[in-house]
Amino acid sequence: MNNLRILHVEDDEQTARMVSEIMSRTGDRVTTVVNGKEGLRRASEEPFDLVILDRMLPDMTGIDIVTKLRTAGLAIPVLMLSALGRTENRIQGLDAGVDDYLAKPFEGASAEELSAMG
């Protein structure tokens, strides 16, 4: 999958920059927003191919966002990136409706895994 339109919901500037750089290498277009309310609004109103979602945001959680997207009937693929990488955290994200869950920080193989998703 190349040339995807990706919405990245991330409040950490360094992570946002890194994800954008990784995903842009394959020609994907990344739109970054820094809070959950804006991310939820954009994901609901605009035609994105993928949402990359931070789990811990200042105004709402990534779990809340994906739950609202799924409740609204939106089947857009969602990848959750989170510093919460324990098995129970991943299970909670998957149960909420995310399609994949990647722990951060990510480098090397994890960066390649992220790139492969685009």
Image (cartoon, rainbow, N blue to C red):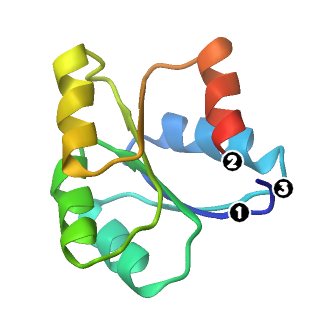
Q: Which mark sits nearer the N-terminus, 1 or 2?
A: 1
Q: Amino acid at mark 3?
A: Gly
Choose top left, top right, bottom left or bottom right for residue 85: top left
Choose top left, top right, bottom left or bottom right for residue 42: bottom left
Q: Amino acid at mark 2?
A: Gly
Q: Mark 1 near mark 2, Cβ–Cβ under 8 Å?
A: yes
Q: Which residue was labeled with disc 1?
A: 4
Q: Is residue 49 above or below residue 102?
A: below
Looking at the image, residue 31 sits to the left or right of residue 112; the answer is: left
Q: Secondary structure at mark 2?
A: loop
Q: Amino acid at mark 1?
A: Leu
Q: Residue 74: give x, y in percent of width and height.
A: 35, 74
> What label sits on residue 118 in the rendered view?
2
Q: Mark 3 near mark 2, Cβ–Cβ under 8 Å?
A: no
Residue at the image position 27 percent from the left and 69 percent from the top? 69
Residue at the image position 75 percent from the left and 57 percent from the top? 28
Regarding residue 3, the answer to whether it shows in the image is yes
Which of the two marks, 3 or 2, is nearer to us in this view?
A: 2
Q: Residue 5: give x, y in percent of width and height.
A: 66, 67
Residue density around tag 3, few if under 14, some if 14–19, many if 20 or more, within 10 Å: some
Q: Which mark sits nearer the N-terminus, 1 or 3?
A: 1
Q: Secondary structure at mark 1?
A: loop
Q: Which residue was labeled with disc 3?
A: 27
